[in-house]
């Protein structure tokens, strides 16, 4: 029989005790693909909604200052730098991180913008993030013509000429600045000229940014997104984002497999590629109260159309409005936890409801429902493999990220056999066993064999409850045998 240490809290076990009972001290785990850190590009949250790039002497105390105030009042997390931080020739690492971590960059071109090497370096970095991280970039041409920026005329041309003299031994740098100015001037943005009403102009920009920020908000995926990246890659192959046809893709599997988690991670990774996006969670539950489906239609349109509130009261009217308003839009729509064909008929009835290139993702426990609605292809959600399950249980049970295999290998293996690779079961077990002594682990797991955990049972029982009565009877007969 395996010798176990006394029932102390795992967090209180000393190195000397570990060596006494097991002959070694557990090592910290290595991060692998199956133990994806929370900073994964698919799941991370941006620290800033908006980064403001501007020439301080031109607009800090007027246009940019007022725009910053408007954005903050709308609850938009906006980065505006302090001139006191600008020391030396090179752009600071703090500014680079702020640019990289922002969803949207607003570049405010004013007459002296190009005279600042800092501003031009910011612009180069902003355009790199637009290309690599798919961030939005919107230029504002403040009291100047966009052609001055595009072709470097007037004060922009004079500033670039001075830079060429200053950096005559580093002309590549100046060429990068010129190219960045041309590229930025070709982007869609706003132009403010003398005679315009500045307050109204700023208010309009703030409204547009607010609508865009709400559309581009990342969904919380999972506390420990173990194994998510590989499953997302499988889904991306099926979705073929960029293709011109409209495609519906299903995610099918039993409860607790992580279908919703996969859908959220996919949504975060591709939402920026569509004109409008919507993630409708809990369709099963939200469609039941009357008029649940009408409310879901209203929510769908509100999200995709960028905050345009709909007040429909009839589900058939909602179908027609969805067709009319979204038939020419390239949209991303996720319908999570669908359990009736009627829900699909009212929310995503056909491929012709949406514009070319649209993608609709449907998660369900009922594969026949997807087949009946002609959803293809269908991704079968997979249980976690042994390494992924072990990593997830470790992260939930041992918050310090220690690898406990050497000191509690037997109870962990027992827990993994009980969970059968279901992320839901592993998360619940890890949280329940966190901080408990090894003897308590054994007692708890022995108890779950006789009396299954109620939180896990509730999720799994939904699949049973959805069966027709003859199938329920057959299921119970099989269980008895």
Image (cartoon, rainbow, N blue to C red):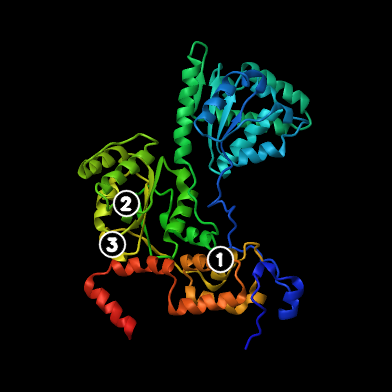
Whether 71 is drawn above or below 358: the answer is above
SS of the residue at dot 1?
Answer: helix
x and y percent of residue 38 in the render? 58, 55
SS of the residue at dot 3?
Answer: helix
Q: Which residue is mark 2?
A: 286
SS of the residue at dot 2?
Answer: helix
Distance, label 1 to label 3, CA atoms, is 31 Å
Relative side of 150 to 379, left or right:
right
Which residue is rendered at x = 69% and y = 38% of the image?
94
Tell me the crowding category of disc 1: few under 14, some 14 to 19, or many 20 or more residues within 10 angstroms, Cα based. Answer: many
Whether 222 is drawn above or below 207: the answer is below
Contact check, label 1 and label 2, Cβ < 8 Å: no
Tell me the crowding category of disc 3: few under 14, some 14 to 19, or many 20 or more residues within 10 angstroms, Cα based. Answer: some
Whether 345 is drawn above or below 387: the answer is above
**Mark in front: 1 vs 3:** 1
Which residue is rendered at x = 33% and y = 86% of the image?
481
x and y percent of residue 282 in the render? 36, 54
Occupied quadrant, residue 393: bottom right
Q: Count how many numbered circles sit on residues in the image.
A: 3
x and y percent of residue 180 in the render? 61, 32
Between 126 and 214, the residue placed more toward the observer is: 214
Q: Which mark is residue 369?
A: 3
In this rendering, does residue 423 appear at all? yes
Q: Which residue is mark 1?
A: 392
């Amino acid at each position: 029989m395996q010798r176990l240490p006394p029932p102390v809290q795992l967090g209180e076990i000393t190195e000397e005790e570990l060596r006494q009972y097991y002959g070694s001290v557990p090592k910290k785990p290595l991060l692998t693909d199956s133990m994806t850190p929370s900073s994964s590009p698919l799941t991370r949250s941006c620290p800033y909604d908006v980064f403001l790039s501007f020439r301080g002497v031109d607009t800090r105390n007027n246009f940019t200052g007022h725009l910053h105030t408007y954005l903050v009042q709308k609850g938009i997390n906006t980065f505006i730098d302090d001139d006191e931080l600008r020391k030396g020739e090179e752009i600071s690492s703090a500014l680079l991180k702020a640019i990289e971590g922002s969803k949207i960059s607003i570049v405010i071109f004013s007459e002296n913008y190009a005279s600042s090497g800092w501003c031009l370096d910011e612009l180069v970095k902003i355009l790199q993030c637009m290309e690599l991280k798919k961030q939005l970039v919107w230029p504002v041409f403040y009291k100047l013509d966009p052609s001055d920026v595009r072709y470097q005329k007037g004060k922009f041309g004079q500033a670039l000429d001075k830079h060429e003299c200053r950096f005559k031994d580093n002309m590549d740098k100046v060429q990068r600045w010129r190219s960045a100015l041309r590229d930025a001037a070709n982007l869609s943005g706003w132009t403010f000229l003398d005679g315009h009403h500045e307050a109204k102009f700023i208010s309009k920009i703030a409204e547009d940014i607010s609508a865009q920020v709400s559309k581009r908000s990342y969904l919380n995926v999972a506390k420990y997104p173990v194994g998510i990246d590989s499953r997302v890659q499988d889904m991306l192959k099926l979705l073929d984002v960029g293709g011109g046809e409209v495609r519906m893709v299903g995610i099918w599997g039993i409860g607790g497999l992580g279908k919703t988690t996969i859908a959220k991670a996919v949504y975060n990774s591709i939402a920026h590629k569509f004109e409008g996006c919507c993630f409708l969670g809990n369709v099963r539950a939200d469609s039941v109260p009357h008029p649940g489906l009408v409310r879901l239609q209203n929510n769908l349109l509100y999200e995709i159309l960028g905050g345009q509130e709909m007040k429909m009261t009839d589900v058939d009217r909602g179908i027609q409005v969805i067709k009319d308003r979204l038939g020419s839009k390239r949209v991303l729509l996720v319908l999570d936890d669908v359990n009736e064909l009627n829900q699909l008929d009212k929310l995503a009835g056909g491929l012709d409801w949406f514009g070319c290139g649209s993608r609709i993702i449907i998660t369900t426990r009922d594969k026949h429902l997807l087949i009946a609605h002609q959803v293809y292809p269908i991704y079968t959600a997979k249980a976690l493999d042994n390494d992924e399950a072990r990593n997830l249980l470790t992260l939930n049970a041992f918050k310090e990220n220690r690898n406990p295999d050497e000191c509690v290998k037997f109870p962990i293996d027992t827990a993994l056999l009980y969970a059968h690779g279901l992320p839901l079961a592993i998360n619940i077990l890890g949280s329940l066993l966190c901080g408990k002594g090894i003897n308590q682990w054994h007692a708890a797991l022995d108890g779950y064999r006789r009396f299954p955990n109620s939180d896990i049972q509730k999720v799994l029982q939904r699949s049973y409850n959805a069966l027709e009565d003859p199938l329920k009877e057959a299921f119970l007969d099989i269980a008895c045998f």
